[in-house]
Amino acid sequence: QVQVVESGGGLVQAGGSLKLSCAASGRTFYSMGWFRQAPGMERELVAAISRSFAVTRYKDSVEGRFTISRDNAKNNAISTVYLQMNNLKPEDTAVYYCAADRRSGSIRYVTSRQEEYQDWGQGTQVTVSS
């Protein structure tokens, strides 16, 4: 059974930091990503990382402030992905979702396309006050 569970959201002042965590279990996962959705807006990619850790992708407005990383358990059954968010801005306020791909089969593949992720977490709220 696949499970994707996020944690680490909260309320922070502008300029502050938060670290989100996501544990995906039950399968071998390839590309993993963080997406976010602000009220009235479409869900968008924030960052994504390949299984090999070698390839990452970021939304332009977060590059240099956010860092995505991951751990893969030796038995391949759990992958944990992190999103370190520094110098947060009010426009970063959104529900953040973790997403995992278990179909691509490539350890270097990373995708920003939501339809290529099969498993999603329930979301965690990040609120940045000005």
Image: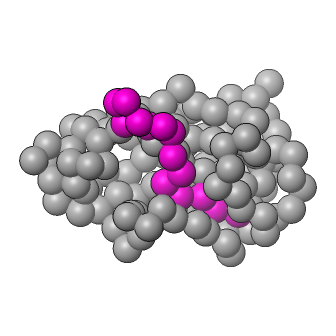
Region rendered in magenta: 37-50
Q: At 38% from the left edge and 63% from the top edge, which residue is drawn?
A: 62
Q: Is residue 75 magenta?
A: no
28 sits left or right of 67 in the view = right
Question: Which quarter of the rendering shows the N terminus?
Answer: top right
Q: Name the quadrant containing residue 95.
A: top left
Residue at horizontal 25 percent and vertical 38 percent from the top: 127
Q: Is residue 69 above or below residue 32?
A: below
Res 25 seen here: no
Expressed as whole percent of the image width and height from the top left, the position of residue 120 reads: 64, 33
Q: Identify the residue shown where x is 21% and y is 48%.
A: 90
Residue 23 image offset from top left, x and y in percent: 60, 40
Q: Which of 113/128 is in front?
A: 113
Q: Foreground residue, 109 or 115?
A: 115
Q: Residue at x 53, y 26 (%)?
A: 122
Measured as percent of width and height from the top left, residue 16 is found at 19, 56
Which quadrant of the structure image shows residue 110? bottom right
